[in-house]
Amino acid sequence: MGTTDETGGRDADAVRAVETALEEIRLLGGRRGRPEHAGPRHERGHEGHGRRHGGGGRLAGVARGRVLGALARADRPLSIGEVGEVVGVDQPRASRLVQALVDAGLAERTADPADARRSAIVVNDAGREALAKAQAARRAAISEALQGFDEDEREQFAELLGRFAAAWPRD
């Protein structure tokens, strides 16, 4: 049986390695081969679908999570354009994603100290808490998925998946 991230040890290292590799693949996969103009039109349909069902949609939630993670990892407030670059979407899509986070109370717009005409985006405490909960849930799901692997298999899988993510073709 695998241990959870909170208990530490080799299993926790494997869970973190798998999580990192999956995130890397997801970020790279979203950017590869997608025409710059295709993103918003294609993704708008997913957002609308989610709104009809009252939840914001899984795909829209994943994109907002990527933005929230990028804001949390940044060592300074980011512009909308920088958010788009980090998560691999164009500026209009980045603006909509940021606005959704602001509306949800997870991020805040501040004045850009370098240019008062622009906004700078920062994650707030509620956003950090939401991100931590999402990461804990993701780690628990990974740990559960690894339950059928013995300790050596978990480590080997994590190592191979990490190599796979590192070898993923970049644009």
Image: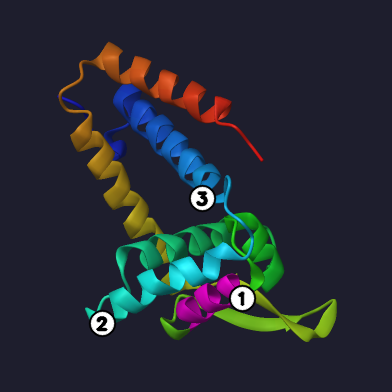
Disc nearer the start of the sequence (2/3): 3
Q: Is residue 64 left or right of residue 71?
A: left
Kindly check if marks 2 and 1 are in contact, taking CB atoms under 8 A apart as contact. no
Q: Name the residue under label 2.
A: 52
Q: Pick whichever of labels 1 and 3 is earlier in the sequence.
A: 3
Neighbourhood count class around disc 2 (C-alpha, 10 Å): few under 14, some 14–19, many 20 upward = few
- Is residue 57 located in the magenta-colored stretch of the structure? no
| Residue situated in front as seen by the camera: 142 or 7 | 142
Q: What residue type is labelled 2?
A: Arg
How far apart are the alpha carbons under marks 1 and 3?
Answer: 16 Å
Q: Mark 3 points at which residue?
A: 30
- Looking at the rendering, the stretch of residues picked out in magenta corresponds to 92-102
Quadrant in which residue 111 is drawn: bottom right
Q: Is mark 1 on a helix, strand or loop?
A: helix
Residue on which disc 1 sits? 92
Of residues 123 and 79, the one drawn nearer to the viewer in this rendering: 79
Examine the image and state in which quarter residue 149 appears. top left
Disc 1 residue type? Pro
